[in-house]
Image: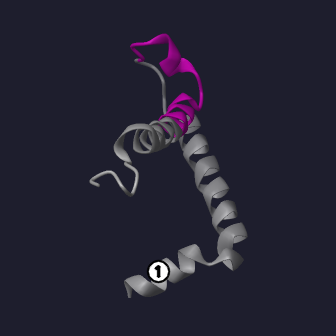
Amino acid sequence: MIRKAVNYLGDPKNIRRHRITLWIILALVFIADLLVPRAHVEHLWDKIPGWSAFYGLVSCVLIIVVSKFLGYAWLMKKEDYYD
């Protein structure tokens, strides 16, 4: 079962379909954020339509970039590290 899912997600023929699905999901999240009433906001940026969708996307990308940087710059060691 998991092999089918991994093969489907990793297949280069499905990349276009995955990207379209991603953009549709992002648009739906943005539209859903526009429909939320903003009567009782605490911060200035909470009034901006689509802010939570944008903030979530930027946060996710930032977590991935920082994790990759830490992995390559600090955590990974050379193959002959213990020699």
- Relative image position of residue 28 (x, y in whole percent): 59, 50
Residue nearest the observer in this picture, 49 or 70? 70
Residue nearest the observer in this picture, 80 or 61? 80
The stretch of residues the image draws in magenta is 41-59
Q: In the figure, residue 13 lies in which quadrant?
A: bottom right
- Relative image position of residue 43 (x, y in whole percent): 43, 12
Element at badge 1? Answer: helix
Q: Does residue 13 lie above or below 43 as drawn?
A: below
Looking at the rendered image, the quarter that the N terminus falls into is bottom left
Residue nearest the observer in this picture, 14 or 81? 81
What's the residue at 52%, 82% (across, down)?
7
Residue that carries the numbered disc 1 in the rendered image:
5
- Relative image position of residue 45 (x, y in whole percent): 51, 17
Q: Main secondary structure of the magenta part?
A: helix
Q: Does residue 59 lie above or below 29 as drawn?
A: above
Residue type, label 1: Ala
Q: Does residue 21 lie above or below 52 as drawn?
A: below
For label 1, the crowd category at 10 Å Cα-Cα, with few meaning under 14, some 14 to 19 and many 20 or more, is few
What's the residue at 40%, 18% (across, down)?
40
Looking at the rendered image, the quarter that the C terminus falls into is bottom left
- Relative image position of residue 4 (x, y in whole percent): 47, 86
Q: Relative to 15, is 75 on the left or the right?
A: left
Q: Relative to 27, is 78 on the left or the right?
A: left
Magenta segment: does it hold 51? yes
What's the residue at 67%, 75% (across, down)?
12
